[in-house]
Amino acid sequence: MIDKNKRILISSALPYVNGLPHLGHLIGCLLSSDVFARFMRLRGFDVMYVGGVDFHGSPAELGAIKEGKNVEDYCNDYAKKHKEIYDGFLLSFDCFGSTHSKENQELVYEAFEGLEKNGFIFEKTLKQVFSKADNMFLADRYIEGTCPYCGYEKARGDQCENCTKLLDPSDLLNPVSAISGSSDLEITDTKHLFLQLQDLQPELEKWLKDKENNSDNNLTWDKQTYGIAKKWVSEGLKERCITRDLKWGFVVPRDGYENKVFYVWFDAPFGYLSIVKEKNPARFDDFWKKPDETLYFQFMGKDNVPFHAVFFPSVLIGAGDKYKKVDVIKSFSFLNYEGGKFSKSAGRGVFAEDALKELPCDYWRYWLLCNTPESDDVNFSFAKFASDINKDLNDILGNFILRVLKFYNKKYGDVISEIPAESIKNVFNEYNHIIEKTSKLIESYTNNFENLKYRKAMEDLRAIWVIGNEFIDYAAPWVLDKTDSIKTQAILIFAMNLIRIYAVLLSPVCPTFAKKILDIFGIDFNPISNKQTIKWVDYENMIDEMSVISFGQKLNIPDSMFNKISDEQVELWKEKFKA
């Protein structure tokens, strides 16, 4: 169990601002981190949840060129769109910002100065393609031409998508700029700065030593994350270029480098620090400068692991180790779409902004958490989406809630009538095995959440709901009521307490669904606020947890709990999103 005295720092990977997220992006770093932040807040931890967007790098500069916009305006426009989507999915960031701030620039310059002072920076001359028409150096992927191996005419300067051969720009036949289409290219010398990663490897290896997967210690890394980091280190770290011939970004503070900026992966990770420093400066030192008092969790797709597990920790070590380094990296594999890939350009796949137009966010949140690609890639299909939603939310949870509440309302009204306390006690004693079974599963659910094992946690949650249905089937209040009205009411009150508990357990995953359930009992819960009025279920004291809903409680019973998805709707979605 995590030490209750520790502060909890959580960061979600900062997506490039030039594209909008699809369902895979959501589960790969955004929803997974939000659910953990909500879970830890409910348990009483001091949480700082950091998110934002990455303004820098060639994708932003080139995206602005293609749309004919000033690059900063372009970034601000897309940042606003990102934030609207994140708000739509109820991501509960404590601090949200971008990598383009004076606070981030100060931290990046500070680190660069430390690396130079400690002898980890050197200069090297490279040959790079320059486009006269665009008046800029071109990154490899922005040079197109004919592949010399297969003849594919749209091969990029780093790889041919057709035959998958790795390429250099000089390999391409008839190369042109992917921006302007111009063939007026030349290879010219350009100076750049490099980080001596190989000299930092011994210290990095010491730091990585205690991160290896160990099921007895949830502060170690999962096998996928550790395996990626270990592979990079075991193959031997190599020097890494940290500057680029771009106009957009943080200008390198060195004579002769006035027309160069820092490599995006050099400055972007400092965004986790700078966003807190900018948005909540009073808490910056607490979370970033007191490493023994804070536990730091990062969430990302597996393709980002090398930069967070190797590159950025090495930068911090080489610059003087002033700031908190990550304790746990949770990485995810990829979510595919109907057997293929998401494609914005082809209109294929469900992108986040479109998903919200089809169903409220909690339907997507629920399915994605249940099907998290934790170690292997997972395929999204509308058929499975509909099946899971209908079975879990409608047939299990919704069915239990409405059976209990509508029967009570039909027989006894919408206010819980007082009955002898002895009757309640007798039912609790008779069904103590239900309490014990539920308690054990809640303990497992809690531990799996704390250990970031989302799919196992969601299996626990479904199993908890099943217990409720089995209980009400066995107790059969609609039969018992014919002979013992008092015991029937006691059984229904027992079931209502289970319903409240289910709402609390569901709240990190589906906050609006949880609110809908808690509203039935007049319990205050704001799915948007980061200051919660409810607490996590105390599974060690379940008798107390089972005694919250009691006599005199007004019941606000909805007509339905969840929307069932029809086969016709599935076919419409498949056509609409080109499945």
Image: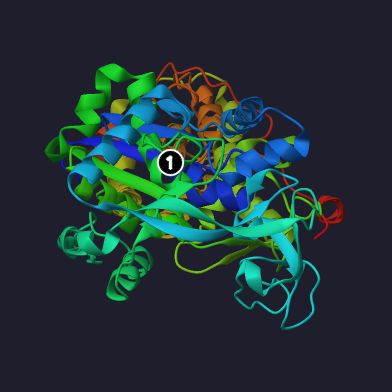
Q: Position of residue 275 (x, y in %)?
A: 39, 28
Left-right relation of 144 to 211: right
Tell me the element at label 1: helix
- Which residue carries the number 1 mark? 268
Q: Position of residue 539 (x, y in %)?
A: 26, 43
Nearest the eye: 354 or 140: 140
Nearest the eye: 482 or 248: 248
Q: Is residue 82 visible?
A: yes
Nearest the eye: 365 or 495: 365
Residue sitting at 61 percent across and 33 percent down?
Answer: 82
| Location of residue 379 by image quarter | bottom right
Report the quarter where the C terminus lies.
Answer: bottom right
Nearest the eye: 213 or 136: 136
Q: Amino acid at mark 1?
A: Ala
Q: Against 120, is 156 above or below?
A: below
Left-right relation of 165 to 498: right
Q: Position of residue 113 (x, y in %)?
A: 25, 38
Left-right relation of 150 to 54: right
Q: Is residue 461 visible?
A: no
Residue sitting at 62 percent across and 37 percent down?
Answer: 361
Q: Position of residue 484 (x, y in %)?
A: 46, 37
Mark 1 Cα shell of 10 Å, populated few (<14), some (14-19), many (≥20): many
Q: Against 489, is 268 above or below?
A: below
Residue sitting at 83 percent across and 57 percent down?
Answer: 578
| Location of residue 55 by image quarter | top right
Instruction: Specify the color scheme.
Output: rainbow
